[in-house]
Each structure stands twice: as structure tokens, then as C-alpha cells.
């Protein structure tokens, strides 16, 4: 499986998916012009990764400082793929700006929806 490394732009996040190391990270702002087109290959890669993953642990960091409603939908798809496919330990860290009330609210929404994932809130 090929790793993914996408550089951050003004409206799309940096994406690192190192499948050999079991490391996935999204960082930055997410409101790409075509959100679903941007994230579709990422969701598919995560699904494939968890189908064939033999690592004991997968580390996932979500460090999105801002995301639009379309990204909200896609994050549900991503987390759904992780929850459905996980057969190992998943360490999922949700980073949020402690000065932004919405960041903690977003974390709570996702952690309530995906109870099988142990999502940790980390303020910065």
C-alpha cells in the first residue's frame, strides 16, 4: 500500500498517511473547493489499510483548525471507516484550540457518535 503525503494549502489540510508505521495525520484548515473529491481517495485508503493491517497500533492525529460542513460529513466517513475496520489498537487524538469553543464541541460530537473509538481531546 502506498503512503500518502499531501502538502497543506490555504484551504486544504496537510495529510500524512504512513501505512508502514501506522500513522495518519490531518492538519490545517479544510474547506477545499471539492471536499468530497479531495477526501474520497483518503477514505478508500483508510478502508484498504484496515482490511490488511497487521500492526498492533495505529496512531491518528486530527489537527484541523477550521473545517466546513462538507468536511464534517467526510470526517464522519473517515471515522466510520476506522471504527468499522479497526482490528488493532487505535490511538486517536483530536487536537483543538482551547480558545475556540467549537473545537471542543466538535470533539464531543465525534466522540459521542463513535463510542467504539477512544478519541482523546488535546488542547493547544
Image (cartoon, rainbow, N blue to C red):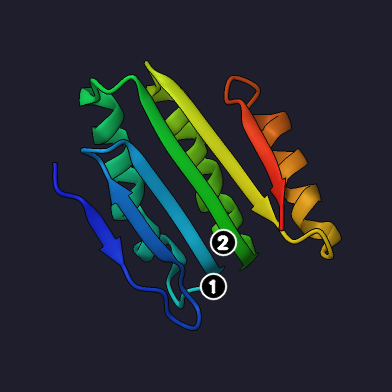
Compare residues 65 and 73 and report the one nearer the observer.
65
Could you tell me which residue is drawn at 36 percent across and 42 percent down? Answer: 23
Could you tell me which residue is drawn at 50 percent across and 51 percent down? Answer: 74
Q: Quadrant of residue 112?
A: top right
Q: Residues within 10 Å of mark 2 (few under 14, many from 20)?
A: some
Instruction: Find residue 9 and report its horizontal and vertical position in percent.
Output: 43, 80
Left or right side of 76 for 26: left
Could you tell me which residue is drawn at 57 percent across and 25 percent down? Answer: 117
Q: Are marks 2 and 1 in contact (CB under 8 Å)?
A: yes
Q: Of all residues shown, which one is farthest toward the bottom?
A: 10
Closer to the N terminus: mark 2 or mark 1? 1
Query: What residue is shown with label 2?
Result: 70
Q: Of all residues shown, which one is farthest toward the top?
A: 87
Compare residues 112 and 13 and report the one nearer the observer.
13
Q: Residues within 10 Å of mark 1 (few under 14, many from 20)?
A: some
- 81 is higher (above) or lower (below) than 87: below
Instruction: Find residue 3 and report its horizontal and vertical position in percent.
Output: 20, 50
Could you tell me which residue is drawn at 51 percent across and 31 percent down? Answer: 91
If the image is split into quadrants, where does the C terminus sit?
bottom right
Q: What number is the disc on residue 31?
A: 1
Amino acid at each position: 500500500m502506498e503512503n500518502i503525503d499531501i502538502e497543506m494549502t490555504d484551504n486544504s489540510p496537510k495529510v500524512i498517511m504512513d501505512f508502514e508505521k501506522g500513522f495518519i495525520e490531518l492538519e490545517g484548515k479544510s474547506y477545499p473547493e471539492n471536499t468530497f473529491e479531495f477526501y474520497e481517495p483518503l477514505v478508500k485508503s483508510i478502508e484498504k489499510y484496515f482490511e490488511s493491517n497487521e500492526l498492533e497500533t495505529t496512531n491518528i492525529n486530527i489537527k484541523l483548525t477550521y473545517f466546513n460542513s462538507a468536511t464534517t460529513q467526510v470526517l464522519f466517513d473517515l471515522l466510520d471507516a476506522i471504527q468499522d475496520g479497526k482490528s488493532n489498537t487505535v490511538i486517536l487524538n483530536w487536537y483543538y484550540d482551547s480558545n475556540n469553543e467549537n473545537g471542543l464541541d466538535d470533539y464531543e460530537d465525534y466522540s459521542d457518535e463513535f463510542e467504539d473509538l477512544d478519541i482523546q481531546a488535546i488542547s493547544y
